[in-house]
Image (cartoon, helix red, strand yellow):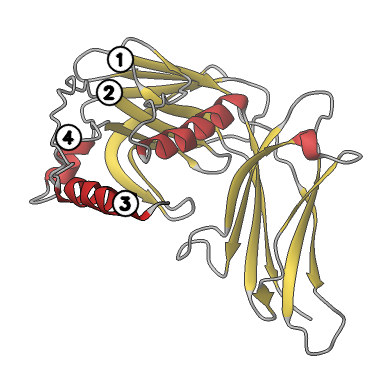
Amino acid sequence: MKIQYIFPILFLVSILASCNLTQDVEIDLPDYDRQPVVECYLEPGQPYQLLLTRSFGFFAPFDTSDGQFLENVIETGATITIRHDNKTITLEEGMVFNPFTFKVFNYGSSEIVPEDFDNEFELDIVLADGETITGKTTIPVKVPLDSVVIEFESDAATDTMARALTYFTDPDPSIENRFRRQFHWNSLIDSMPQQDFLATDQFAENGRIVFGTGFDYPVGDTIYNTVFNLNRDYSDFLESVVISIQSNGNPFGQPAAIDSNLGGTADALGIFTGLSYSREMTIIEK
């Protein structure tokens, strides 16, 4: 560059740097219509339990003081029944914490979900305002774990770091099966899963599927391997939730819809599904 052009360029840069290039923009957002939200997981051997809440707009004020949290979120006054095999189960209103699933519900029954993988379950909800929510589902067959294999990175006596390989068999290679893999380290309650993802049986080799970890776990630690067999409705719901969370972090992205399997007049969000999984606890030993 010739020397006579340097000073004009520096002068131009200094002018641009001194300018205020920020500008506040006001955007009129449409009013958000809050929707009922249902979460109901039918797990054999567990009571019938359901969480019924109401959604909030992303930018809506959310008061958590003076007990307003429950009033803002919980949907009260609903009549809820689940029909199965010519029997009707009524879910009573009341806050319940399930110590086995670590979930909170505000409707439930002492009736136990049967281990029935053939017959359909039907949900009927009448809200306090008369709007309705409906749903149908089945409980998928549990897929047993074939084995959990612990491997060390080398055969050296001093090597204490191991990985876990979790093997199971595709229950029906003639159709697409969907699974959820969770891997917990040392606790199911006090820690987030080290792995939590969805998969299909397209990764099966000769009918077997394997999920693995890195060589990250020392001798003496406890690990929990869990494999869920998913209904397609539940798999689609989970995928849509993940996409929605990712979209919330992108100011230029379009809002993502939640893929629910609910019907009725209330335009509800959520999921009504059977829950089936196999879980194995392993203590890592040399």
What residue type is disc 2 on?
Gln
Residue at numbered disc 2: 35
Q: Are marks 2 and 1 in contact (CB under 8 Å)?
A: yes
x and y, in percent, of residue 52 in the image:
31, 32
Q: Nearer the viewer, residue 90 or 40?
A: 40
> Which circle's residue, 4 or 1, is located before the other in the chain?
4
How far is disc 2 from disc 1 in space, using C-alphas? 7 Å
Q: Is residue 153 above or below residue 10?
A: below
Residue extending farthest to the top is 265
How far is disc 3 from disc 1 in space, using C-alphas? 72 Å
Q: Nearer the viewer, residue 153 or 116?
A: 153
Q: Residue 4, which numbered label?
A: 3
The answer to whether residue 110 is visible is no
Label 3: which secondary element: helix
Q: Disc count in the image?
A: 4
Q: Quadrant of the C terminus?
A: bottom right
Density class for disc 1 (Cα within 10 Å; few <14, some 14-19, many ≥20) is some
Residue at numbered disc 1: 266
Q: Residue 250, which numbered label?
A: none
How far is disc 4 from disc 1 in space, using C-alphas? 21 Å
Q: Nearer the viewer, mark 3 or mark 2?
A: 3
What residue type is disc 3 on?
Gln
Density class for disc 4 (Cα within 10 Å; few <14, some 14-19, many ≥20) is few
Q: Residue at x 41, y 39 (%)?
A: 245
Density class for disc 2 (Cα within 10 Å; few <14, some 14-19, many ≥20) is some
